[in-house]
Image (cartoon, rainbow, N blue to C red):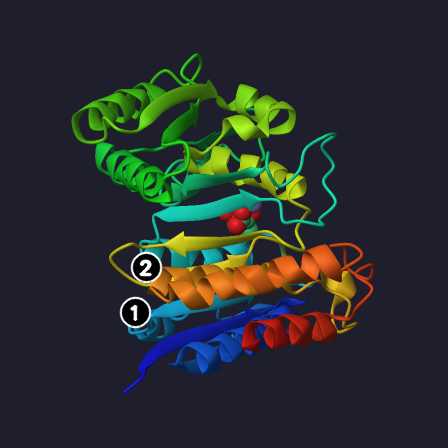
């Protein structure tokens, strides 16, 4: 009996459905080749549903999603919906409700991909950012007082518990160990200004590291310096761990150094629960329905998903197939400049996986 994975597919808005279609095509190809099955269930969460019904992510859907092996997400964001509603109502709600407390974002330059950094290639750009995904500024604590008056005050708190910090650090240490590359974990913070939150992070980092991960080398960088070295000496990094908002910001920079939003993927991970995989880029409304968007980021999100599900061979095969496409076929990672359509890129990778 072959194994069956129950996957919730959330194509979402804009180009989400187009890239998810190609992602699913590649996943199906890997399933056929490596002898497992996919039981896919589509959900229509997104801007269109919100405009029709006023619903973002109903509690009943969240309840159902808890019963899946993984979630495969396209993109959230609609030009007719005010910014914040869908992001908070769908993406962040899912991350929080399913307690996907890690946002895993590999920064890996594939062969043949144009890199904006001078003299840097796949040898130099290959590290992983472990972004804390449940706390910090994203908890939404704070408020506005005396709104609309000259004395208006707005507060947004960076909130962290020892529990949140420690579970994230432990994940990052384990990841550095499993990755077994340079066995180095870099904490990216701001101990010189955020003297409360990063005091907690730094103490926990060294306590946990010293006690349980003596084989992993510990480094510390301020977040501003981190961005500098990500550009100047990306080869210094192996695994970077950081708080939520810093992670959000530095992974966009990381994505650009690996060829841009057309190729960057990430996983919202609950190591004990249901994880959700997505291309990092947005819904790209201006390219919607044109068959020009790059599906490789979604395909790589699917590849990460299979890796997380334990289908290592299938995951590696997809990565190899993507590398084949980037080194031999695609002219560019940018929408409309690939030299192929969205569907053609999906077909090419799926065929390569099938072998
Ligand atoms: C990301 C996005 C989200 C975030 C937005 C859309 C809420 O930028 O996944 O990086 O800030 O986490
Ligand atoms: Mn972001």
Q: Which mark is residue 66?
A: 1
Q: Residues within 10 Å of mark 2 (few under 14, many from 20)?
A: many
Residue 115, placed above or below residue 343 = above
Q: Residues within 10 Å of mark 1 (few under 14, many from 20)?
A: some
Q: Are marks 2 and 1 in contact (CB under 8 Å)?
A: yes
Residue at disc 1, secondary structure? loop
Residue at disc 2, secondary structure? loop
Residue 76 visible: no
Left or right, 258 with respect to 100, comes to right
Left or right, 307 with respect to 1, comes to right
Residue 330 visible: yes
Quadrant assignment for ligand 2: top right
What residue is shown at x 46% (from left), y 20% (from top)?
221
What residue is shown at x 50% (from left), y 46% (from top)?
106
Residue 132 position in % (x across, y down): 38, 40
Residue 178, placed above or below residue 183 = below
Per the model, the C-alpha gap separating discs 2 and 1 is 7 Å
Residue 234 position in % (x across, y down): 58, 29
Q: Nearer the viewer, residue 171 or 238?
A: 238
Q: Which mark is residue 251?
A: none
What residue is shown at x 31% (from left), y 39% (from top)?
177
Residue 81 position in % (x across, y down): 63, 61
Mark before the other along the chain sequence, 2 or 1: 1
Residue 347 position in % (x across, y down): 67, 76
Q: Split into 4 quadrants, where in the image is the C terminus?
A: bottom right
Q: Which mark is residue 98?
A: 2
């Amino acid at each position: 009996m072959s194994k069956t994975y129950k996957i919730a597919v959330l194509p979402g808005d804009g180009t989400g459905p187009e890239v998810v279609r190609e992602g699913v095509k590649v996943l199906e190809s890997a399933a056929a080749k490596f002898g497992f099955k996919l039981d896919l269930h589509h959900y229509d969460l997104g801007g269109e549903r919100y405009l029709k019904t006023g619903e973002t992510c109903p509690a009943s859907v969240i309840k159902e999603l808890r019963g899946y092996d993984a979630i495969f997400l396209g993109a959230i964001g609609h030009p007719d919906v005010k910014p914040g509603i869908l992001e908070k109502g769908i993406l962040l709600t899912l991350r929080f409700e399913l307690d996907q407390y890690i946002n895993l974002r590999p920064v890996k330059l594939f062969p043949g991909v144009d890199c904006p950094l001078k003299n840097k290639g796949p040898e130099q750009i290959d590290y992983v950012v472990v972004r804390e995904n449940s706390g910090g500024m994203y908890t939404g604590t704070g408020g506005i007082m005396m709104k609309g008056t000259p004395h208006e005050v707005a507060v947004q708190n960076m909130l962290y518990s020892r529990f949140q910090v420690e579970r994230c650090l432990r994940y990052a240490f384990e990841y550095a160990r499993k990755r077994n590359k340079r066995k180095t974990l870099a904490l990216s913070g701001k101990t010189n200004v955020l003297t409360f939150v990063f005091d907690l992070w730094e103490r926990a980092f060294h306590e946990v590291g010293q006690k349980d991960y003596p084989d992993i080398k510990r480094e510390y960088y301020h977040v501003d310096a981190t961005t500098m070295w990500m550009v100047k000496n990306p080869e210094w990094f192996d695994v970077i761990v950081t708080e939520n908002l810093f992670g959000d910001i530095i992974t966009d920079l990381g994505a650009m150094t690996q060829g841009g939003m057309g190729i960057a993927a990430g996983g919202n991970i609950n190591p004990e629960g249901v994880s959700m995989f997505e291309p990092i880029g947005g819904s790209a409304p201006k390219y919607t329905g044109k068959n020009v968007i790059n599906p490789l980021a979604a395909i790589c999100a699917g590849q990460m998903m299979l890796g997380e599900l334990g289908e290592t061979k299938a995951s590696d095969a997809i990565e190899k197939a993507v590398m084949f496409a980037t080194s031999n076929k695609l002219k560019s990672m940018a929408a409309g400049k690939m030299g192929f359509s969205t569907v053609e890129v999906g077909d090419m990778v799926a065929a390569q996986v099938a072998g």
